[in-house]
Image (tube, rainbow, N blue to C red):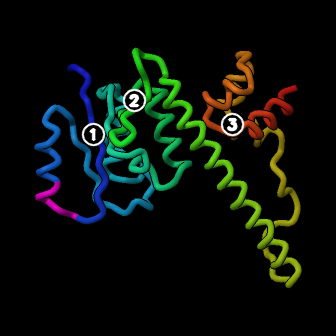
Amino acid sequence: MDNMKARYIRISTPDQNKERQLINEHPNELIFIDVCSGSVPFNQRTKGKELLEAVAATKIDLVSVHAIDRLGRNLLDILTTLKTFTDAGVILKVDNLGIDSMIKGKVNPAFNLIVSVMGNIAEMERETMLERQREGIAIAKAKGNYKGRLRGTKESKEEILRKYPEVVKHLKKGQSLRNTVKLAGVSLSTVQKVKGLLL
C-alpha cells in the first residue's frame, strides 16, 4: 500500500456539514477530524491518537494542518507531536505559514528555526511556572500551610539526564551547543546544564 497524505483538523463543536465540506475540499488526503476542546492533549484526542498510530505504522508520509497550534494543547504538547512526526520521517505542511518541516528528506532550516523559537518560549513558560510555584510554596511555608515534601526538591543528575535524552544523544555525538538546541528543540540554558553534567 502506498503511503498516504493526511490532514489533521480540530473543531470545537460538531458540525456534519462542515466535516463533509472539509472532506470534499481535500479529496486526496486522509482526513482526521477531532471534535474537542483545544485543551485536550494531542495524544488523548480520538483522531489525534489514530493519526499517531498511522504515523507509527509508516502508513503516512505527509501531514497537513491549517496552523501549528492544532497539534497540541500547549507548546510542549505541540513540540512533542512535531518530534514524533520528525522521528518517523513524516513531513508536516503548515498551511498558514506556507512551510514544510522537511525538504528532500532533510529538515527545513526555516522550519527548524520556528520550532527552536517555540522551544525557547516553552522553556521560558516552564521557568515562569516553576518560579510562580516556588513563590507560592514560600508564601505557604511562611503561613505554615505547606504540605509538600521539603527535602529532595532538586532534581538529581540522573533525573536531569533522563529528562533530556535527545540532548544527551546529540552532545555525545559531538554536536555543538547551538546545533543541539535546534535538533532537540530545547533552550541553550538546558543544553549547557546537561553538558555540565556530562563532563
Q: Nearer the viewer, residue 183 or 116?
A: 116
Q: Residue at x 72, y 55 (%)?
A: 127
Task: Say whether disc 2 or disc 3 marks the residue closer to the N-terminus.
Answer: 2
| 17 magenta-colored | yes
Mark 1 and mark 3 in contact (Cβ < 8 Å)? no
Mark 1 surroundings within 10 Å by alpha-carbon count, few (fewer than 14), some (14 through 19), many (20 or more) = many
Q: Which mark is residue 194?
A: none
Q: Nearer the viewer, mark 2 or mark 3?
A: 2
Residue where numbered disc 1 is placed: 7
Of labels 3 and 1, the one closer to you: 1
Q: Main secondary structure of the magenta part?
A: helix
Name the N-terminal-most of marks 3 and 1. Answer: 1
Closest to the observer: 4 or 91? 91
User: Mark 3 = which residue?
Assistant: 164
Identify residue for label 2.
100
Q: Earlier in the sequence, mark 1 or mark 2?
A: 1
- Quote the CA–CA distance across marks 2 and 3: 26 Å
Residue drawn where x is 76% and y is 62% of the image? 131
In percent of width and height, residue 137 lies at 80, 72
Q: Is residue 2 shown left or right of residue 41?
A: left
- Whether residue 78 appears in this view of the structure is yes
Position in image of residue 136 (x %, y %): 77, 73
Above or below, 45 against 156 in this view is: below
The answer to whether residue 43 shows anywhere in this view is no
**Relative image position of residue 112 (x, y in whole percent):** 54, 30
**Magenta span:** 14-18
- Is 99 situated left or right of 182 in this image? left
Relative image position of residue 4 (x, y in whole percent): 24, 27
Quadrant of residue 92 within the rendered picture: top left
- Going by the numbered disc 2, the residue's amino acid type is Asp
Residue type for callout 3: Tyr
Which image quadrant is residue 117 in? top right
